[in-house]
Structures are given as C-alpha cells and as structure tokens.
Amino acid sequence: FVLPSQQFGTFWLHAVTDCDDDVLERNENNNQGTATMATVITLLPPPDFVVDSVAIAATGMSGMPVALTYTVRNQGFNPPPPSTSLWIDSLWLCPDTVFNRATEISLGGRTIYQGSVPLAPGLTYTSGQPVTLPQGISGTYYLMVHPNARGDVFEYTYNNNNRRFGNAIQITPYRDWE
C-alpha cells in the first residue's frame, strides 16, 4: 500500500483476520496481532511553491478584461506527488498590500494541471490569461496571487509564503454613454 505524502511519525502495525467472524473457528480470540516494533515513517521533503512575479496592467476599466501574468516556482526539495494531478491558484484584487479576506475581491482561480512532467524543484510555470475586472469598482487596487490556495499539494509548513502582491492598477468606472 502507499501512504499519503503528508503521513509521518511512529506507527504500530496491527493485523486483524476474519474481522466479521465469517469463518467458523474453535478459537475466535486469536485473530489479531501487533508488530513487536514500531515503524518510523519519515516525511519526504515536500515541494514549496512561491510566487516569483506578478504583473497586471497599470490601468483598467471596471467590467472590462485586463492582462495579467504571474510566475510560480517550486523552491522545495521534491515535485508534487504524481497523485496530485492539479491545484488551484487564486487571484484577488486588494485595496492595499495586506491580505484581508473581508476587503478583498476574488477574481476566481486558475486550475494548474501537473501533466506528465511534475513541477520539479527550481522549475516554474507562468499563467498569462486575462481577467475581467468586477463591475462597479474604481480606485487603486493590487493583484494578489495565492498558488495552491486549496492546499491540494502538501507543502507541510512551507504553505505560509505562497502569497505575493503585484503592481498597482488604477481602475476607472465603466462609462455607458447611452
């Protein structure tokens, strides 16, 4: 069997046979056993995703698409395990460079598919799809990127350095001249 990538510690192996008592036996009290020694499972050094760069257009109009790009690097010691086929990067518009979910505006997420070649240590991926700015907002905002936002890739204690803010974007209200 294969253990989950985040499993580590000291464990005892227990075995139980005929757990539903389906086999008629003279002695039903000898169907369990425990290993005489504990098994120590060491954590495989995990990946660690960090945002290398975030860029968004300097100006945009409420309700209209705007160009953005960001690059994420695995600065960890191993790639994500093959069992992790995808993860979600979340994008946020923030009125300042301090993340506060109560004041941020979600721009949705980007699904990143690992594919046949895992994101090995030192490698990067770049996303450059445009995003539509929300209707009815104006002022100065910052784009914040949070890779692996749902924690699909186990990063152990390294998931605290994932967020990064980009440059400011000045958003003007959409003008309907009709």
Image (tube, grey):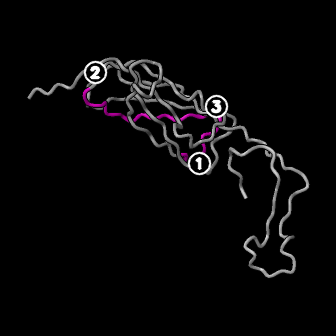
In space, the residues marked 2 and 1 are separated at their CA atoms by: 38 Å
Q: Nearer the viewer, residue 176 or 126?
A: 176
Instruction: Return the residue at label 1.
Output: 84
Residue in view at x 72 percent, y 73 percent: 20
Instruction: Return the residue at label 2.
Output: 138
Where's the C terminus, which quadrant? top left
Disc number placed over residue 99 in the picture, else none: none
The reply, left or right, for residue 42 in relation to residue 143 is: right
Where does residue 128 sit, x and y in percent of width and height? 42, 34
Instruction: Return the residue at label 3.
Output: 158
Q: Which residues are magenta?
A: 114-136
Kind of residue indicated by mark 1: Thr
Where's the N terminus, which quadrant? bottom right
Callout in the foreground (3, 1): 3
Name of the residue lying farthest toward the right: 36
Q: Secondary structure at mark 3?
A: helix
The mark nearer the N terminus, 3 or 2, is 2
Q: Secondary structure at mark 2?
A: loop
In space, the residues marked 3 and 1 are separated at their CA atoms by: 17 Å
Residue neighbourhood size for the residue with mark 3, other residues' Cα within 10 Å, grouped as few (<14), some (14–19), many (≥20): some
